[in-house]
Amino acid sequence: MPPRVSTLSRTAYSAVAFLFLLGAQAATVSWKAPVSGAWADGVNWSTGTPPGALDKVVIDTPGFYTVTANGLIHVGSVQLGGAQGRQTLELQTGSLVCTGASTVGTNGIFNLAGGEVAGPATWTIDGTFNWSGGGLNGAGKTTFSPGSVVTVLGGVQKSHFGRTIENRTTVLWRDQGGTVVGFGASWINEIGRAHV
């Protein structure tokens, strides 16, 4: 017969686990070098491991390169785009779930080729956003700022569930595949802004 764990022991274990989680600190995890590579490869990151659930991800090393993301990724926030060059983040499969405010700066390029951007985060796109597959989903909001370059392309169906898209620029709609909108999603065009 296995030993019994008392209620007091279970409470103590829960308290230790809770205190451990409280002690977990968010780190700033940066892309190390101006070379293309996989998000999942720890050698590419300043900490030697891919970013974790609380971490602030910074992809701003000057240069021209692409960070390719696949799988289930949970992070605190993403800051994409540096002072020089063009830094690209391409989500191919899986989910990129952010809980904090995230940005694509003027030199940043976010290619949503598959998978989904999800979670409660607000994304502000000041740079380039190319939507060729996958979905903008979750309870958060995505804002296309004035001057940002937004293109919907690819000829495949895309999903848009739950998330609010606030459009303050002209969206280039080069897609024949259509977009599925539902479950509380909204697309709000600022006056004078349109899809062309």
Image (cartoon, rainbow, N blue to C red):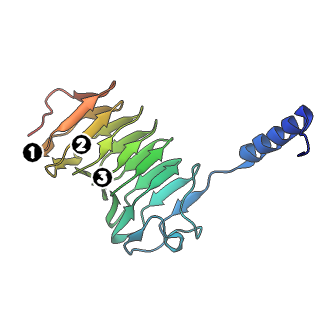
Query: Which residue is denoted by mark 1 in the rendering?
Result: 176
| Residue 11 at x, y percent in the picture | 85, 35
Query: Which residue is denoted by mark 3 in the rendering?
Result: 114
| Residue 123 at x, y percent in the picture | 38, 42
Image quadrant where residue 118 sits: top left
Closer to the N terminus: mark 3 or mark 2? 3
Closer to the N terminus: mark 3 or mark 1? 3
Q: CA distance from mark 3 to mark 2?
A: 9 Å
Answer few, some or many: residues within 10 Å of disc 1's Cα (few below 14, many 20 plus, some between 14 and 19): few
Quadrant location of the C terminus in the rendered image? top left
Quadrant location of the N terminus in the rendered image? top right
Q: Secondary structure at mark 3?
A: loop
Q: CA distance from mark 3 to mark 1?
A: 16 Å
Q: Is residue 17 left or right of residue 169?
A: right
Q: Does the CB distance between marks 1 and 2 fall below 8 Å? A: no
Query: Which residue is denoted by mark 2 in the rendering?
Result: 158
Measuring 13% from the left and 45% from the top, which residue is drawn there?
172
Indicate the amino acid at tag 1.
Gln
Measuring 51% from the left and 49% from the top, which residue is drawn there?
74
Residue 152 vs 166, above or below: the answer is: below
Residue 123 vs 69, above or below: the answer is: above
Indicate the amino acid at tag 2.
Lys
Q: CA distance from mark 1 to mark 2?
A: 11 Å
Indicate the amino acid at tag 3.
Gly
Measuring 49% from the left and 72% from the top, which residue is drawn there?
44
Q: Secondary structure at mark 1?
A: loop
